[in-house]
Amino acid sequence: MLPDLPPTVGRIIHTLLTAENRLSQRDLADQAGVSARTIRNYRNRLEAFALIRIDETGYRLALSFQTAVERRDSVVPTVLKGNQTLLDAADAFLETLLPPARCGDPDDPLGSVLFWQPDPSRLLDHPTVGPWLRLAIALTVSDTLEKNWVVQMGPPLEQQPLSSRAT
C-alpha cells in the first residue's frame, strides 16, 4: 500500500483502512506494528492531505468504516470534496516540513515552488516530497499534471422541455 512512501506509512494507512472504529495512538501503533513516535512523525503529513482525522477519541481514516452504521455515509478526504489543486496540497504539505521563513523563499529549493510563478510539479522528482505529491495528485481530482482543455465545437445547445417539442 502506497509503495512510493515509507513502509510504515503504508502500515498505518492499512490499519486505519481495516479498523471498524477510531483507534487511540497506542492502539494504532500496536496494530500497525510501528512506534507511537512514527505515528507522530507522519501525523502532520497525513493531516495535510486530509487522509486522517484525529480528535479526542482517536485516529480514523477519512473514509467510512466498514460497518453497517457507516457503510453508506459519505466520509471522504476533503481533498476530494472541494476544488483543491496540487498547489494547495503542496502548500499544506510544505508547511509541515519547512519553517515559515522558507515557504515562498525564491532561493530555497523547496519553498521556491510557492514563489511566483508557483510550480509544485517541480518537486515530483524530489526524493522526500515527490512521493507525497504524487499521492496528492492521485487524491486531487481537480488537478493533474497534464494541461487539459475543454473544447466546444459548433453552436451552443439550448435545452428545451420535451413537452414543447411534441406540438
Image: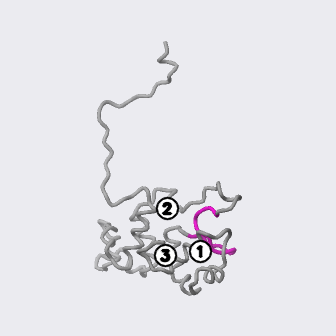
Element type at mark 3: helix
Instruction: Please report whichever mark, 1 or 2, sits nearer to the chain's N-terminal start.
Output: 1
Q: Residue at x 57, y 87 (%)?
A: 35
- The residue to which callout 2 is attached is 79
Local packing at callout 3 (Cα closer than 10 Å; few below 14, some 14-19, many 20+) is: some
Which quadrant of the figure has residue 110? Answer: bottom left
Q: Amino acid at mark 2?
A: Val
Element type at mark 2: helix
Q: Rounded to the nearest whole Å, what is the CA distance between mark 3 and mark 1?
A: 17 Å
- Indicate whether residue 55 is drawn in magenta: yes
- Indicate whether residue 103 is drawn in magenta: no
Q: Residue at x 43, y 74 (%)?
A: 3
Q: How many marks overall?
A: 3
Which quadrant of the figure has residue 21? Answer: bottom right
Q: Rounded to the nearest whole Å, what is the CA distance between mark 3 and mark 2?
A: 14 Å
- The residue to which callout 3 is attached is 45
Q: Amino acid at mark 1?
A: Thr
- Nearest-to-viewer mark from 1 and 2: 1
Local packing at callout 2 (Cα closer than 10 Å; few below 14, some 14-19, many 20+) is: many
Q: Amino acid at mark 3?
A: Arg
Instruction: Please report whichever mark, 3 or 2, sits nearer to the chain's N-terminal start.
Output: 3
Tell me if residue 109 comes above or below residue 135 in the rendering.
below
Nearest to the observer: residue 28 or residue 140: 28
